[in-house]
Amino acid sequence: MIKISNVSKWYGSFQVLTDCTTHIEKGEVVVVCGPSGSGKSTLIKTVNALEPIQKGDIVVNGVSIADPKTNLPKLRSHVGMVFQHFELFPHLSVTENLTLAQIKVLGRNKDDALKRGLKMLDRVGLSAHKDKFPGQLSGGQQQRVAIARALSMDPIVMLFDEPTSALDPEMVGEVLDVMVQLANEGMTMMCVTHEMGFARKVSHRVIFMDQGRIIEDCTKQEFFGSPEARSPRAKEFLSKILQH
Ligand SMILES: Nc1ncnc2c1ncn2[C@@H]1O[C@H](COP(=O)(O)OP(=O)(O)OP(=O)(O)O)[C@@H](O)[C@H]1O
């Protein structure tokens, strides 16, 4: 489904990603973790070419992002992305937020877009809020609308970049519940998150990054179950998070 091969990236002279190689199969949930600044967000943003790469390739569903002939807006329309900050349009109602890209990018008619959007809004438990504006919703509700908006586009994969880290603690659970539900329904997911409870509960694999490199790429059982077999940097990270 997604093949990341020998990806390197620089910001000016600073190398942010070094020779990253991994893959995500259909229906797999992969959690990307690691210390702050290790390149997790940058890596996930390269998957839909929001961040360009200078070396290597990423193939999404058979389409190479490095191929100059690739239609990147079309590729992005199949890849759902949910960010730390919800990035809903503040001047549009929830319904308008849900339908805009379906109409403009996928060319759906208004009725079909509305039907699909409301179905996804129901899936995240927010049907009653369809006519509100983002500012009238809590952070957790806004993030659930952002997830519903991404799902309305019928994505083949969902990318999550720290979707709960800007939320008050009591709202984290409601967003994670939606993500757990999606994972259980078989959605292919790549998630940058510090929520190790989520990683332990639903992920299939864990990628651990440090200084722009993928240091560990293993099953969650290997990652959490046998910390003694991990690299020194991952061991240190695990010992910190497992204290709590
Ligand atoms: N647009 C940019 N220009 C220059 N440097 C950048 C840019 N974006 C990120 N960086 C740097 O690249 C490195 C990796 O950043 P990135 O956000 O990918 O890390 P991260 O692992 O997701 O961190 P965090 O967990 O703190 O969000 C950091 O040193 C960061 O300062």
Image (cartoon, helix red, strand yellow):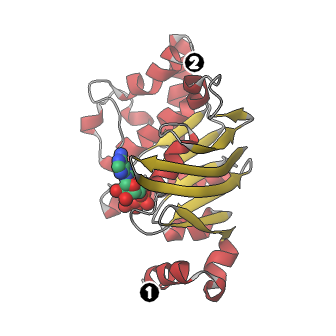
Kind of residue at badge 1: Gln
Q: How busy is the neighbourhood of tag 1: few (under 14 within 10 Å), some, or many (20 plus)?
A: few
- Asked if residue 31 is positioned above or below residue 163 in the image, the reply reads below
Locate the N terminus and report the quarter of the image it occupies: top right
Q: How busy is the neighbourhood of tag 2: few (under 14 within 10 Å), some, or many (20 plus)?
A: some
- Asked if residue 36 is positioned above or below residue 164 in the image, the reply reads below
Work out whether residue 164 can be spotted.
no
What is the number of the mark on residue 243?
1
Marks 2 & 1, CB-CB < 8 Å contact:
no
Q: Residue 65 at what x, y percent from top left?
A: 62, 34
Is the CB of mark 2 within 8 Å of ligand 1? no
Residue visible at 61% across and 84% down?
227
State the residue in front, 18 or 23.
Answer: 18
Q: Name the residue furthest bottom.
A: 228
Q: Which residue is mark 2?
A: 106
Work out whether residue 45 can be spotted.
yes
Q: Residue 110 at what x, y percent from top left?
A: 50, 12
State the residue in front, 107 or 217.
Answer: 217
Q: Residue 98 at what x, y percent from top left?
A: 45, 27
Kind of residue at badge 2: Leu
Residue visible at 51% across and 65% down?
33
State the residue in front, 19 or 229.
Answer: 19
State the residue in front, 28 or 236.
Answer: 236
Secondary structure under the numbered disc 2 in the rendered image? loop
Residue visible at 30% across and 59% down?
168
Is the CB of mark 1 within 8 Å of ligand 1? no
What is the number of the mark on residue 157?
none
